[in-house]
Each structure stands twice: as C-alpha cells, then as structure tokens.
Image: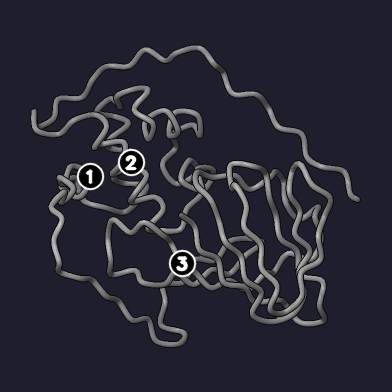
Amino acid sequence: MPDQPHFLQHDKQALQVERAETDARVEPLQLGQRVREIRLSQGLTLEEASKLTGLARSTLSKIENDQISPTFSAVTKLVNGLGIDMPQLFTQPNLERGGSGRRDITRYSEGRPHPTPTYEHELLATSLTRKKMIPYRTVVRARDFKDYKEWVRHDGEEFLYVLEGQVMLYTEFYEPTLLNQGDSAYYDCEMGHALVSVSEQDAMVIWVTA
C-alpha cells in the first residue's frame, strides 16, 4: 500500500467576522444551506471551491455549517468564485410540500463537463436545484495514488458504481479495494478517499453524492 498523504490540522480557533447586512427574512442557516447547495450542484469539493473563491476550506465549512456569518467581502468572493449572481445566493428555499413532481433527463454526453487533474466528471441532472442527491458520470484519469496531493473529502455520503474497467478504491480507514465492472461501494465521504484506474483503459464510474 502506498504512503498516504499527511494533512494539516485546521485552526480550531473561532473566527471573529462581521455579519453582512442581508434581508431580514434570510436566516444564517438558510444561507449556509444555499452555499453548500450551490457548491454541490457544481460538483465541487470544499478544496475545489476554496481555490475558486479564495476562501480557506475551514472558512467555507464553517459558513456552510452556520458556525460563522460571512463578511460582505466573503460573500463577494463566493459569488465571483462560484459564478453566480448575488440573488441566487439569497434565494429563499421553497419549503412547500405537495404532490407536484420534478424531472430532469440528461442525454448521453450532454451533461455539464467538470474536469479535474484526476477525474473527468460529467454532471447530470443539472437543471434541477435543491437536489438531495448529486449524480455524475466520471472517467477516472488517475493512474497512481500519488497522483493525489491529498485525500478527497467533502460532506455527505457517496455511492459508487463501476460502469467500465477496473478501479482501486482507497479509503482512509480501510485497505485499498479492487472494484470490477458492476461492483459498487457506499461510504462516508468525509472520510478521505481516492479512486485510481487499474484497467488498460481509463475506467468509467457513476457517482451519487447525498
């Protein structure tokens, strides 16, 4: 088993921040939920969103979990980094329950591309907002565990299904596991994890993050 990366401990000291002036109807919890919702809808990990926005990963996590309220400067970085408009960030979630249904169909190869150094993601069902699950199809470009500078971590739980090829699933607290076509795995994705193609051709998988 290859050496596993070392991770720095984030500063546990509570951050003192200035509360941004917002509509009184928008509660901090709803703002945190919206930030996480938007990040996940774009298939971004906290690390990736941190790089795009210029905000520390720990700061983003605290905003999403309503542990701090973002300054106006932080809100501006979120809007610019995530490529959204300010009203999108402060849109009230629809809490109404009813019999009406939602549906989205993604035709083959018509998902939203989201390439990374190790994965080539295709985000699915992108026209729906406030999804409880984030589905995406991925070609695994990584060929060695050392291709990852650090563990992949993000909120929620994840289901993985191998469509083509073979992959080696690395998880922080378990031995690496070989998965063949048709195999699947379900795991807590706050636990460090990474996927490597071991077949002749790059493997393709379906991921569903909840």
Q: Is residue 29 left or right of residue 45?
A: left
Residue picked out by circle 3: 135
| Mark pair 2, 3: CA separation | 23 Å
Say whether disc 2 or disc 3 marks the residue closer to the N-terminus.
2
Mark 1 or mark 3: which is in front?
3
Question: In front: 203, or 177?
Answer: 177
Question: In front: 95, or 74?
Answer: 95
Q: Amino acid at mark 1?
A: Leu
Q: Amino acid at mark 2?
A: Leu
Residue 10, position in %: x, y? 59, 23
Label 2 close to label 1 by CB (< 8 Å): yes
Residue 4, position in %: x, y? 82, 42
Image-quadrant location for residue 201: bottom right
How many marks the image carries: the answer is 3
Determine the residue positioned at 37% across, 47% down. 81
Q: At numbered mark 2, what does the secondary structure look like: helix, strand or loop?
A: helix
- Please tell me the numbered disc located at residue 89: 1
Q: At numbered mark 1, what does the secondary structure look like: helix, strand or loop?
A: helix
Residue picked out by circle 2: 78
Determine the residue positioned at 74% across, 80% down. 165
